[in-house]
Amino acid sequence: MTDGAGISGFGRGLRLRQGGVAVLAVVGLAGLAGCHSYHVETSVENRTGAPIKLLEVDYPSASFGDESLAAGAVFHYRIQLQGSGPVKVQYTEPGGNQPQLTGPQVAERQEGQLEIVLLPGGKAEFHPHLTPAK
């Protein structure tokens, strides 16, 4: 009787563990299927002909930047969009001028690439390669 109870108890414990693993596997797979992380690979290229300072790129709900960016240098950053709105860029030129530029509208759940090329005279080109807004 003791042997039967011991085996029976072991079997129940094993079944519970297997059931727990099965439940965790199903929950994990459901999470993978429903949770896609959308990212935008962003680059800022300084083609102004001079170094710049205090680079800031604003996008819906966040921003990124760097203290300085040498002439000809490229700054890469990966973002995740939350909300929707325009991309805005500002920086300080060697003479103290602070261009403020507005780029394309972006929206949550878009992904792809966004290239920002800073040009002389406080101008910029924006090259979005993004999925359509959902």
Image: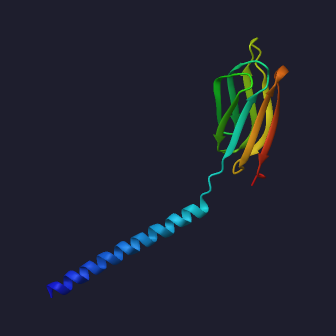
Residue at 79 percent across and 20 percent down: it is 49
Residue at 77 percent across and 15 percent down: it is 97
Rendering coords of residue 80 (x, y %): 65, 44
Residue at 62 percent across and 52 percent down: it is 37
Q: Left of 119 or right of it: where is 9?
A: left
Q: Quadrant of residue 2?
A: bottom left
Rendering coords of residue 124 (x, y %): 82, 29
Q: Left of 77 or right of it: where is 17?
A: left
Q: Quadrant of residue 120?
A: top right
Q: Quadrant of residue 106?
A: top right
Q: Residue furthest top?
A: 95
Rendering coords of residue 81 (x, y %): 67, 44
* Viewer-proximal residue among 60 and 22: 22
Rendering coords of residue 1 (x, y %): 15, 88
Residue at 65 percent across and 29 percent down: it is 65
Q: Residue furthest left?
A: 2
Looking at the figure, which quarter contains the C terminus?
bottom right
